[in-house]
Amino acid sequence: MKKKTTIYDIAKKLNITAATVSRALNGNSKISEATRKLVEETAKEMNYEQNRLAQALKSGKSYNVGVIVPRIDSNFFASVIRGIEEELYPKGYHVIICQTHDQKSLETENINSLLNAQVDGVLMSISQAQNANDDNFDALIKKNVPLIFFDRKKDIKGISSVTIDDFKGAYEATKHLIDQGYKRIAHLSNDRSILIFKNRYLGYKQAILDSGLEFDESLVIETQSKVLEGRKIMKQLLELEHRPDAIFSSSDFTALGAIQEIKEHGLNIPEDISVVGFSNEPFTRFMELSITSVDQSPIEMGRLTAQVFLEEVNSDKRVTSEKQVVLTPELIVRKSSLRTPVKH
Amino acid sequence: MKKKTTIYDIAKKLNITAATVSRALNGNSKISEATRKLVEETAKEMNYEQNRLAQALKSGKSYNVGVIVPRIDSNFFASVIRGIEEELYPKGYHVIICQTHDQKSLETENINSLLNAQVDGVLMSISQAQNANDDNFDALIKKNVPLIFFDRKKDIKGISSVTIDDFKGAYEATKHLIDQGYKRIAHLSNDRSILIFKNRYLGYKQAILDSGLEFDESLVIETQSKVLEGRKIMKQLLELEHRPDAIFSSSDFTALGAIQEIKEHGLNIPEDISVVGFSNEPFTRFMELSITSVDQSPIEMGRLTAQVFLEEVNSDKRVTSEKQVVLTPELIVRKSSLRTPVKH
DNA sequence: CTGTTAGCGCCTTCAC
DNA sequence: GTGAAGGCGCTAACAG
């Protein structure tokens, strides 16, 4: 690597000290307009660029934040990340992205690795926990590294979070099905130790109870957010003596799998069985049979998460009580659940 | 943040110097087994962790590498990134991911930003260039920061790359169509100043010429890798007096758009029009009408890219000639192009 | 307003 | 084998 110019080089050239150069470059108020200009010009002339590593060492801040998600190849997480970046880049922060692939071991590894890299904070969506994995967060909390959950959170005292109102989203999705006349609505759930899935389940349940329909726990099935899992589960449901006439899935991917299976069994959607997903992944719109889903405004979620982080990192009092931001979901009705077909 | 223990703390406790501690921890040979053990134990005991910022400042290496891609919410790029991570994490590197969203301005911004963060290298897939954007790379090259292209590359002297044989992939895809008896094959291309698209075009063209069919340049259309673009273009093609009977698309997303448009016009796939995409995105498999596509083994591509980076960064002679790794693509035949339907 | 000094945490000669 | 000293590049406290 070519030798880079430092503030000393500038100082020497101008017969002043490095400190002065530093001050001039950092907008310190106690500096003459003349030298400031001079320094700035010379800096540009000499192609000076601040060494962030040195600055980081000095300040103890790396200006890197870690973002941990289950995976990045879903539009939802990719969009949240985009929102985070949009908010953080202008403030000089970089984002290090880690994927857990829903494995606890990777989650642990990622956290340690980020800690080791001296990140200034960690924004994360937790992975599916085979068992409680709170110890993963302990390391962060113990070191007082700002931790903020988005979407998939756990309730931990003092930890802020940005989520959507999953209960409401699920409630409305289920109510939409009920309003259409469906009576036996199954719910494809997911690991309910993760709050979003728990809340979607509760919203679903409440909608059913509120409508006076019978709530049948056996129609609630926990699975993973994967197309093939959706197929597998749907297959079981179709073999039921008294099969469901509608599906509310906590994931678009499982919903897609369910749809495939339903069609393969020669049934029609939404006439025989109606399907609603969750997340509003782009493919739900692009399918020939477009899928009704719940939008989570992921970019907004990312921006808000970043903002909460910035607030925390810029406040000295580290004992601030946590902040819980909750976004409102939006049901997007499409063909897969609408008995009177609409154009979309 | 709680005060972290440094090598000085360990030194003080053991009545030795920080230098000795450093040596013990770094596996320096000239150190007694006794003190090494002692130091290691005390380090663990005191919860010591190396401050990577300090080490970075000292060594001039940040152990961060930048990865720049057009977007991360496509399975292809997400998978390449996964491959890169798998290779780099064990070596202590972190990956900073940047998206260009195919905008040149963002590409420039990202490069500068990464440079500013003192990354040890940049692995990138270039964005669609409205005009030549070589100056973007100049900054990197000038600073002697290892730059490695994957997938979307430019031919720049001294810059290594990892790609697949796009010509071959396109040739085989086109040949597959020809073998099925299709005679008027259109090609949905993309910015051909990017080599992958140029090569896919050339492979397509060669397959047609080799088969004795007439090559019609008007059936080659440049567009963007987006579903809606695919629809738009397909609409135009369908209005042609002598419309094509097959489509070879350089992108799965455009292929999907084309398929939607074809269906909407009441035509059958693959009977009336056959469609082949490129990239083997998961949705091509999951569609009811599964889409024939060309697999690019993205994870492998990521791993190889990372390996090339590691080689470069670990060799002193910075004037090594570039390395060009080329992977072999694989055509995955599915319903959208196979006249005798198969199960998939 | 600007110079001096010191230190962030680590590593690497150079001595002994 | 280990200690002493200096420096990576920058900034902040203290002088003046």
Image (spheres, coloured by chain):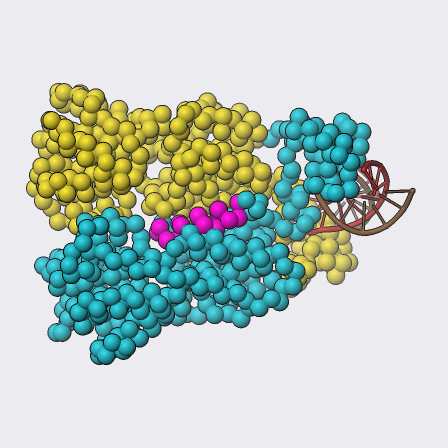
Chain colours: A cyan, B yellow, C red, D brown
The residue shown at (47%, 34%) is: B105
Q: Which quadrant holds residue A236? A: bottom left
Question: Measured from the top left, where is residue A336 in percent x and y?
Answer: 20, 58
Q: How many marks?
A: 0
As drawn, is B134 to the left or to the right of A199?
Answer: right
Picture layout, residue D12 above or below residue A50: below
Query: Does the image show residue A105?
Result: no
As drawn, is C7 to the left or to the right of A203?
Answer: right
The residue shown at (40%, 68%) is: A195
The residue shown at (37%, 34%) is: B151
Picture layout, residue B141 above or below residue B333: above
Question: Measured from the top left, where is residue B193 in percent x and y?
Answer: 36, 25
Quadrant of the rendering where the N terminus of chain A is positioned: top right
The residue shown at (44%, 64%) is: A326
Identify which residue, A150 or C11, lies in the foreground: A150
As drawn, is A193 to the left or to the right of B224?
Answer: right
Q: Which quadrant holds residue B324? A: top left
Question: Measured from the top left, where is residue B342 in percent x and y?
Answer: 11, 46
Identify which residue, A219 or A100, lies in the foreground: A219
Picture layout, residue B158 above or below residue B84: above
Residue A146 among those drawn in magenta: no
Residue A84 among those drawn in magenta: yes
Query: Does the image show residue A47?
Result: yes
**Boundaries of the magenta span:** A74-89
Question: Measured from the top left, where is residue A227 in percent x and y?
Answer: 26, 56
As drawn, is A190 to the left or to the right of B56?
Answer: left
**Of helix, strand and loop, which mostly describes the magenta segment?**
helix
